Image: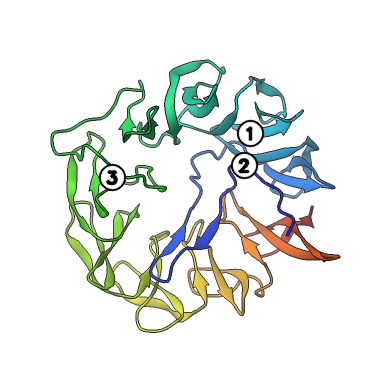
Amino acid sequence: MKRLFLLLVFTFSITSCDVVNSIVPNNDDNKVKLYPVSVDGEWGYINANGKIVLEPDFQNAAPFHDGLAAVRESWGWKYINSKGEIVIEENFNEIQQFSEGKAAVRFDGRWGYINKSGSFVINPKFRSASSFSDGRAFVRSVDYSDFYYINENGDRIESVNMPGDMDYIEENEFRDGRALISDDDLFGYIDKNGDTVVDLKYAEARPFSDKLAAVKISDRWGYIDRSGQVSISPQFISVGDFGNGLAPARRNSNSFGYINKTGEFVISEQFQQAGTFAEERAPVMIDNKWTFIDKSGNQITSPKFDEVNPFYNGLARVTIYVPVGEEIEENYGYINKSGDYVWFPTR
């Protein structure tokens, strides 16, 4: 299968039979409503009406975050503004999206953080680094020995009751003032000061979303609040994150529905797979194809997409597989919240 690598594009997936794992974009940047599209293998940007605003002159392109977007030009990654002007052009090995005015970049084999002028504000001294959230970022020491959080100055966050040897966690951002942490295969939560606010006692757990976090107790999933108190009793085989007041779950069947914050199903169990609501739309799979539903459970299109991304700034990117000889090409398009194409899938 031909796959065009696109840096920093949000994805949605089911990663296990127990928990729905979804990555929902942070819609804190509503000023730049531009979306990357591919035209004959070159990338540019459209507006919310599907009109090309930045011509497809890039080898690759990522969504805008914090006012800037990562693009690939002349085989190097750079940052552009909403006018398509290259504002940061350096010889970085890898780059990530901007968040809270900083972006993680890899230079000479080590990761650090730059500002929007392209200057290092935290020197490259980490083996790996993640985006900032709530003034904190998850990094790995250059000697591979430790994972830990840093503040905006690059200083390590430490606390007397914080595990000294944390495990790697992919979804390490702070949400609702809490971050999921793991040590010796047990999960708990810390606050911004590094204090453990929910003891590491769960065999499996999810980050907070809408002020609730999914945790597995014995063989069932439930939800706790920010203080660690059980808010929804453990009763589900599989669950996902809350978004717009609803979360995907399945209690006793092979199909997913959606529950509210009291644990009651408001959309019945009927979907093969289901993701988190964003902008009052959620991706669901029916007969091996994806579509989106609204909060009443109504489909906004027939199930016809091979892959989908969550809605952000009013649009969702969808993917159609197109057979070409013995290979499969991925064509990317965008739909609006009514389910109408604003950009028909292209490659």
Q: CA distance from mark 3 to mark 2?
A: 27 Å
Mark 1 is on which residue type?
Ala
**Amino acid type at mark 3:** Arg
Q: How far across and how far down the image is residue 25, in percent?
A: 51, 48
Q: Residue at x 45, y 33 (%)?
A: 128
Name the residue beneath numbered marker 1.
Answer: 70
Going 18% across and 50% down the picture, which residue do you hit? 198
Which residue is tagged 2?
Answer: 7
Name the residue that disc number 3 marks. Answer: 178
Give how far across and how far down residue 132 sits, in percent: 42, 34
The span from disc 1 to disc 3 (Cα, nearest Å) is: 28 Å
Q: Alpha-carbon neighbours of circle 2 within 10 Å: few (<14), some, or many (≥20)?
A: some
Mark 3: few/some/many CA within 10 Å (<14, 14-19, 20+) = many
Q: Residue at x 69, y 39 (%)?
A: 61
Q: State the residue lying farthest toward the left.
A: 160
- Rendering coords of residue 244 (x, y %): 42, 59
> Height in image: 196 above or below 81?
below
Q: Amino acid at mark 2?
A: Leu
**Which residue: 45% across, 17% down?**
121
Residue 9 to residue 201: above or below: above
Residue furthest to the bottom in view is 253
Q: Nearer the viewer, mark 3 or mark 2?
A: 2
Which of the two discs, 1 and 2, sits closer to the camera?
A: 2
Asked whether the beta carbons under mark 1 and mark 2 sit within 8 Å of each other, the answer is yes
Q: Secondary structure at mark 1?
A: strand
- Picture quadrant where residue 97 is located: top right
**Helix, strand or loop status at disc 3:** loop
